[in-house]
Image (cartoon, rainbow, N blue to C red):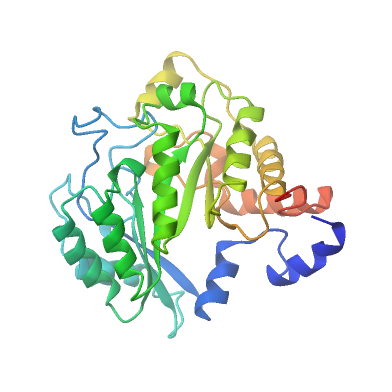
Amino acid sequence: MHASDKETLKKTWNGLPYYSLNTWLKQQFGAKTYKLSLNAGMSCPNRDGTIGYGGCIFCSEGGSGEFAAGGFSAANGNLPDIRSQIDAARLLVSKKAAANSRYIAYFQAFTNTYAPVSRLKDLFTETILQPDIAALSVATRPDCLEPEKVRLLGELSQIKPVWTELGLQTIHPDTAAFIRRGYPLSCFDDAVRRLKAAGLTVIVHLILGLPGESREQMLESVKYLAHFSPPIDGIKLQLLHVLKGTELARLYEREPFPLFSLDEYADFVITCLEYLPPTMVIHRLTGDGPKKLLPVPAWSMDKKKVLNTFARRFRERDTWQGRYFSDL
């Protein structure tokens, strides 16, 4: 990427030094677009004994679904129908949403293709046909994407855009075993290629700061996704959160491991972005941990300070997403 491209890119990115999700959404839908966090009431093969018990060591009891409107969860027995969830989630953002706002139905908790195809078809079809739903986003595992499920998602994408979010976290097998991910990198590779062949948008999660991983190893995971073929559409860079009640938290209490400071993390994420293609949408820079679960590092809860630190470091380094990316 040549320095002469910097200003052109920043114009495309609404003046930012990276391709943010907000910028991409405005380009795609022409209006402010909000995510509605929903809970399909599904479990995970890494929790119910199919692959393992307890899930990945960083996963909370809510399976990352704590931000669903009204605290809806299958565990506490108050999971309403999907239309009621959409209404409740829409109400949460109603004060800041304009009349023409659009919404993304985000099935976030646990593994959202871990059910019979018939159930998935009924659930996702009802959701995607809601008039103000602009896209369907489905968080799942690569090992829960059988051909008939990928085919269903492909059919739904003919109605409205469908995103599939995959939690890779790392490309390194030792770390994957340590966090109890439960599937090999080859499974991820195969799933991405089949999803892309079906015309689906693919977003990948990476966790930065996993115990035992060096920054060089984390950057290797980033570069792996940067050069994946076919191209991955979006990435979520997730700061490692040590959440109360997880196996990771118990490990941290017994043997505290190094965590990123805010300045260290901002600098490292900016380095990661320098190696990502300028066409890849950045869906997340840090992630939000639910305050009731006391996420560590505590600095991650001050979102304004975090974003200001990123902006300052981008200016000080005079850099941008894709600066060192090459597709040669």
Residue located 37% across and 74% down the image: 160
Q: How many marks?
A: 0
For residue 274, side relative to residue 62 (left or right): right
Residue located 25% across and 27% down the image: 52
* Residue at the bottom extreme, as displayed: 99
Above/below status of 274 relative to 83 = above
* Residue at the top extreme, as displayed: 254
Visible residue check, residue 290? no
Residue located 36% across and 67% down the image: 92
Above/below status of 78 relative to 16 = above
Residue located 16% across and 61% down the image: 80
Q: Which of the pair 288/193 is nearer the observer?
A: 193
For residue 113, side relative to residue 136 (left or right): left
For residue 55, side relative to residue 178 (left or right): left
Quarter of the image with the N terminus is bottom right
Where residue 308 appears, as percent x and y from the top left, is 68, 53
Where residue 162 appears, as percent x and y from the top left, is 38, 65
Where residue 215 appears, as percent x and y from the top left, is 65, 29
Q: Residue 250's quadrant in the figure?
A: top left
Where residue 181 appears, as percent x and y from the top left, is 37, 31
Q: Residue 185's quadrant in the figure?
A: top left
Above/below status of 312 relative to 209 = below
Above/below status of 46 relative to 113 = above
Q: Residue 163's quadrant in the figure?
A: bottom left
Q: Which of the pair 150/64 is nearer the observer?
A: 150
Visible residue check, residue 304? yes
* Residue at the right extreme, as displayed: 4
